[in-house]
């Protein structure tokens, strides 16, 4: 991929083609091959970037050390390579983290990593007793949402099952940990509820949030842990207070089921994707729509949306299996994946590496693909905005004695007026890297 240099201009009217750098393909026993149940419904990177988790179908989750090591086979064209995974545990080599396979015995619909691991603590715990509740604060854990409504929580280092959380009456469609490094887990289910679990208390009880009238597809906790966003088979986005466990407001504008959502790293913008082929950018504090994006292909249904780690880009995947990466302030994608050579299957999920530069996508045929994405250094003014907005709401910004243009920038209101000069708006916020 040609990377933009500071001070140069690029024709953003034509999206670049994304570069595929790696691929993971499951190898299932012959009776299971190409049968329903092989979908990759969820794929996630750990917060510290040490592991990649992949639901490879038929109740199995693979934990792969990240970054990937090149397979012993010859690399394919364009410096991409492919690795096949059998459904069995990998071997530990030279004391390094090893691949693990978790057998959940139910279809795995959702994955979420918990707190960052502590290298000092985990160095002495490689062999293997499950963590105590206190140790969990320094252990990397993975939660898996299952077809039967159960949530299984595993210790990544050992592969031990820590908790089996019960309460949901249907598929656990999404999971997310509070991003404050604690052990608060939020789950969304087809039983039309969200549940908030405190794993420090063993997950024995949960706060239940009711109000959705359709299946819950996705839930996210804001970076400051003040609110939860959830979307379902309805046309609205629901916002909830994380402090009082009460409903705050609905965000309305989509014309079909809202399928996915994500907060920007500073929590000031919420992005939502719908089966109506539209993406909305919202101010979650005021409920105002900041920008609306539509796909040129009207029959493409979106499946997943995610913000990049620095908050200047977001990615979408859709039924046509195409990956699109969008820059904040621009009304068309800047990167698209090339048309697949294999038969088209639905794109289902996507996730950015926490270090940036890589995006993973999962598809209905059980594969995971890794794409090279833009690596940029955000401008100082964007970094300052992120730093401020992590702890200051839109209402608080508007009350500050600042010029209107500065308030508009800090609250992302500039997205409302940037269409005419959208490429310039974006270039002001980044310095690209090789």
Image (cartoon, rainbow, N blue to C red):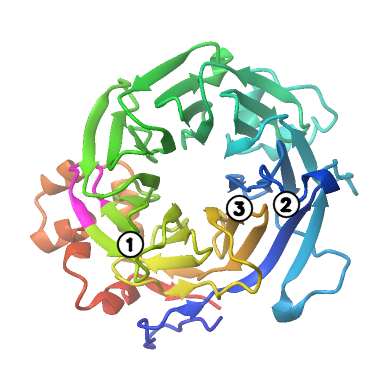
Circles 1 and 3, Cβ within 8 Å, touching? The answer is no
Report which quarter residue 395 is drawn in: top left
Give the residue at x 39% y 41%. Answer: 223
**Labels 1, 3: front one:** 3
- Secondary structure under tag 3 reads loop
The crowd level at tag 3 (other Cα within 10 Å; few <14, some 14-19, many 20+) is many
Give the residue at x 37% y 81%. Answer: 12
Magenta-drawn segment: 282-290
Q: Which residue is disc 2 drawn over?
A: 34
In x, y percent, where is residue 99?
80, 45
- Secondary structure under tag 2 reads loop
Q: Is residue 49 left or right of residue 375?
A: right
Q: Which mark is residue 382?
A: 1
**Labels 1, 2: front one:** 2
Task: Using the rendered image of the protein, determine whether residue 29 is visible from the camera's viewpoint.
Answer: no
In x, y percent, where is residue 344?
59, 65
Mark closer to the chain start, 1 or 2? 2
Q: Nearer the viewer, residue 380 or 328?
A: 328
In x, y percent, where is residue 150?
59, 23
Mark closer to the chain start, 1 or 3? 3
The crowd level at tag 2 (other Cα within 10 Å; few <14, some 14-19, many 20+) is few
In x, y percent, where is residue 345?
58, 60
**308 to 297, vertically: above or below:** above
- Secondary structure under tag 1 reads helix
Query: What's the distance in space between the residues labelled 3 and 2, CA to CA?
Result: 10 Å
Q: Which residue is disc 3 drawn over?
A: 364
For the stretch drawn in magenta, the main secondary structure is: loop
Q: Nearer the viewer, residue 186 or 87?
A: 87
Task: Using the rendered image of the protein, determine whether residue 97 is visible from the camera's viewpoint.
Answer: yes
The crowd level at tag 1 (other Cα within 10 Å; few <14, some 14-19, many 20+) is some
């Amino acid at each position: 991929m040609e990377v933009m240099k500071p001070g140069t201009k690029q024709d953003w009217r034509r999206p670049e083609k994304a570069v595929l750098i790696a691929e993971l393909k499951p190898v299932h026993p012959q009776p299971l091959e190409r049968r329903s149940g092989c979908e990759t419904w969820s794929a996630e990177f750990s917060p510290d970037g040490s592991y990649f988790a992949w639901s490879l179908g038929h109740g199995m989750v693979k934990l792969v050390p990240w970054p990937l090591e090149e397979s012993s086979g010859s690399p394919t064209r364009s410096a991409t390579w492919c690795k096949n995974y059998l459904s069995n545990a990998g071997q530990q080599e030279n004391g390094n983290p090893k691949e693990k396979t978790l057998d959940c015995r139910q279809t795995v619909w959702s994955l979420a990593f918990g707190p960052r691991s502590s290298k000092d603590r985990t160095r002495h715990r490689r062999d293997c007793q499950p963590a105590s509740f206190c140790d969990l604060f320094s252990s990397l854990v993975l939660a898996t949402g299952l077809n039967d409504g159960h949530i299984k929580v595993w210790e990544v280092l050992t592969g031990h099952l820590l908790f089996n959380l019960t309460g949901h009456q249907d598929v656990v469609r999404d999971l997310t940990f509070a991003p404050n490094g604690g052990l608060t887990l939020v789950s969304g289910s087809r039983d039309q509820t969200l549940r908030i679990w405190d794993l420090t208390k063993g997950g024995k009880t949960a706060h239940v949030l009711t109000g959705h009238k359709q299946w819950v597809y996705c839930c996210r906790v804001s970076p400051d842990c003040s609110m939860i966003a959830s979307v379902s088979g309805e046309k609205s986005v629901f916002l909830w207070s994380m402090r009082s466990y009460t409903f705050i407001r609905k965000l309305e504008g989509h014309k079909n089921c809202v399928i996915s959502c994500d907060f920007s790293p500073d929590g000031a913008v919420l992005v939502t994707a719908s089966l109506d082929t539209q993406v909305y950018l919202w101010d979650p504090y005021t409920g105002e729509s900041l920008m609306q994006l539509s796909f040129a292909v009207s029959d493409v249904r979106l499946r997943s949306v995610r913000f990049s780690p620095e908050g200047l880009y977001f990615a979408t995947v859709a039924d046509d299996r195409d990956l699109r990466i969008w820059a904040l302030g621009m009304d068309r994608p800047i990167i698209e994946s090339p048309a697949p050579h294999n038969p088209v299957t639905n794109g289902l999920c996507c996730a950015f590496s926490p270090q940036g530069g890589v995006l993973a996508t999962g598809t209905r045929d059980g594969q995971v693909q890794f794409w090279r994405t833009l690596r940029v250094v955000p401008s100082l003014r964007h970094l300052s905005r992120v730093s401020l907005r992590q702890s200051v709401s839109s209402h608080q910004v508007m009350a500050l004695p600042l010029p209107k243009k500065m308030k508009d920038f800090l609250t992302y209101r500039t997205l409302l007026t940037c269409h005419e000069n959208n490429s310039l708006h974006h270039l002001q916020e980044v310095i690209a890297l090789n």
